[in-house]
Image (cartoon, rainbow, N blue to C red):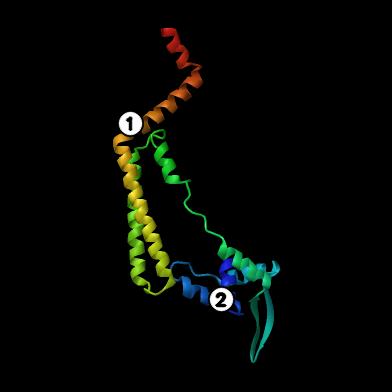
Amino acid sequence: MRYALLALLAEGSTYGYELKQAFERLFRPVWPPINVGQIYTTLGRLERDGLVRSREVEQSGRPDKRVYELSDEGRTALANWMDAPVEGTRLKNEFFMKLVLATLAGTDPGQLLDRQRGEYLQALRDLDTLALETEAESPARLLIEGAMLHLQADLRWLDRCEERLGDGLSRFRAVGTSAKETKRNAATGENPSAVEETGR
């Protein structure tokens, strides 16, 4: 929210409620409604950090309003944020961890895949409905379409996982069995290598 407000203020000075309206025009319906109190709290922190300035403006017949504008430091911070690349693909994936550990937990990996596929398909249907309800020229439409493309890629990845499991499910089970045997041997003090050597 900090940098979104800085970007909106780059167009010129304004006050909190106008910032709320501008943000919601750009990101509705993909962003939950923002409490105007959150806007003013964030503006207060930005002013404390020297990134914005504010001043009271008199209004005839109405309470004065506080108008905010970017400081030079704020413009620099905004430029640095815009120039920095966003983090790409993450290798930490909770579902993949579940899939690999499924056999150890006594869970069928195939059922995990089916449930996750159902989750992605429902999310894709929801986004498709949202896209139909969103104006084609709205910036939010691009975000919706991007999310749909990500889900389609996730579904293809699940198919790939299923293919690997189809011809390698025994390998997943073997990993789980090996881990269980190691745990049991540690508990009993057995050394499989020593037993093998003795039998030779």
Q: Which residue is mark 2?
A: 19
Neighbourhood count class around disc 2 (C-alpha, 10 Å): few under 14, some 14–19, many 20 upward: many
Q: Is residue 1 left or right of residue 128?
A: right
Quadrant housing the N terminus: bottom right
Q: Which residue is denoted by mark 1 in the rendering?
A: 170
Q: Residue shown at 31%/42% (left/top)?
A: 162
Q: Is residue 168 above or below residue 91?
A: above
Measured as percent of width and height from the top left, residue 138 is found at 41, 73
**85 horizontally vs 195: left or right:** right
The Cα atoms of the two marked residues, 2 and 1, are separated by: 57 Å
**Res. 167 image quadrant:** top left
Q: Is residue 7 visible?
A: yes
Instruction: Give the quadrant of the C terminus.
Output: top left
Residue at the front extreme, as displayed: 83
Asked if disc 2 and disc 1 are in contact, CB closer than 8 Å, the reply is no
Determine the secondary structure under disc 1.
Answer: helix
Q: Is residue 195 above or below residue 149?
A: above
Tell me which amino acid carries mark 2.
Leu
- Dot placed on the residue nearer the N-terminal end, 2 or 1: 2
- The answer to whether residue 41 is visible is no
At horizontal 56% and vertical 69% (from top left) the residue drawn is: 4
Q: Which mark is residue 33?
A: none
Percent x, y for residue 160? 33, 45
| Front position in the image: 109 or 192 | 192
Residue under the image location 65 percent in, 70 percent down? 74
- In the rendered structure, the answer to whether residue 46 lies left or right of residue 195 reads right
Type of amino acid under label 1: Ser
Which of the 4 quarters of the picture holds residue 172?
top left
In depth, the one of 199 and 45 nearer the eye is 199
**Disc 2 secondary structure class:** helix
Q: Where's residue 55, x and y in %?
A: 69, 80
> Is residue 150 positioned above or below 62 on the image?
above
